[in-house]
Amino acid sequence: MRILGVDPGTATTGIGIIEGERNSGFKSISYTCIKTDSKLPIEERLKLIYDSLDAIIKESKPDLISVEELFFNSNPKTAMSVGRACGAIILCASHNNLKVVEHTPLEVKSAVVGFGHAEKIQVQKMITKLLKLSEMPKPDDAADALAIAYCAGVSLTR
């Protein structure tokens, strides 16, 4: 199974692609980030996210997309921005006939570290180990996207 994990954001959207099965383990295929310029109008930023993700989907041919579920924190402006990016991501998945699964940050941390309140660095170190990477994925958004993909992999192949 090939899973494309997405850590949504309008400034930086993390992308991580893994392949494998729960019993045999997962390996990282690739990871990157889609970055947009904050000076661009929101519609151009969302189009850039959509078009970039569409190209990644067409090249990598995932079986499904795993997205981190929107977590409403104390900053409504950030939540709105992430929600817009999520909309573009889910629409792109739909246009490519891909199933979308969403996982909360708690679920991702639990799947990767075994503890839902783990620190970000713990998740990054553990995903590096689980995917047998030679170094921690950078930037953080890419590491988070790999963790989101991994969460879907262990959740769906139980």
Image: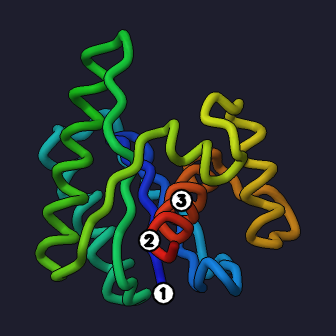
Q: Residue furthest front?
A: 158
At a point 51% along the width and 37% down the height, the residue shown is 106
Spatial CA span between label 3 and label 2: 8 Å
Q: Position of residue 31 (x, y in %)?
A: 58, 68
Q: Nearer the viewer, residue 84 or 115?
A: 115
Specify the label residue 156 is tagged with. Answer: 2
Q: Earlier in the sequence, mark 3 or mark 2?
A: 3
Q: Position of residue 63 (x, y in %)?
A: 36, 84
Q: Position of residue 85 (x, y in %)?
A: 25, 46
Q: Residue at label 1?
A: 1
Which of the 4 image quarters holds residue 54? bottom left
Disc 2 crowd rating (10 Å Cα; few below 14, some 14-19, many 20+) is: few
How many numbered markers are drawn?
3
Callout 3 secondary element = helix
Q: Nearer the viewer, residue 38 or 141?
A: 141
Give the residue type at disc 3.
Cys
Which of the 4 image quarters holds residue 82? top left
**Above or below 34: residue 117:** above
At a point 63% along the width and 28% down the height, the residue shown is 117
Q: Position of residue 90 (x, y in %)?
A: 20, 60
Callout 2 secondary element = helix
Q: Earlier in the sequence, mark 1 or mark 3?
A: 1
Give the residue type at disc 1.
Met
Callout 1 secondary element = loop
Q: Residue at label 3?
A: 151
Give the residue type at disc 2.
Leu
Q: Are marks 1 and 2 in contact (CB under 8 Å)?
A: yes
Spatial CA span between label 1 and label 2: 10 Å
Q: Nearer the viewer, mark 3 or mark 2?
A: 2
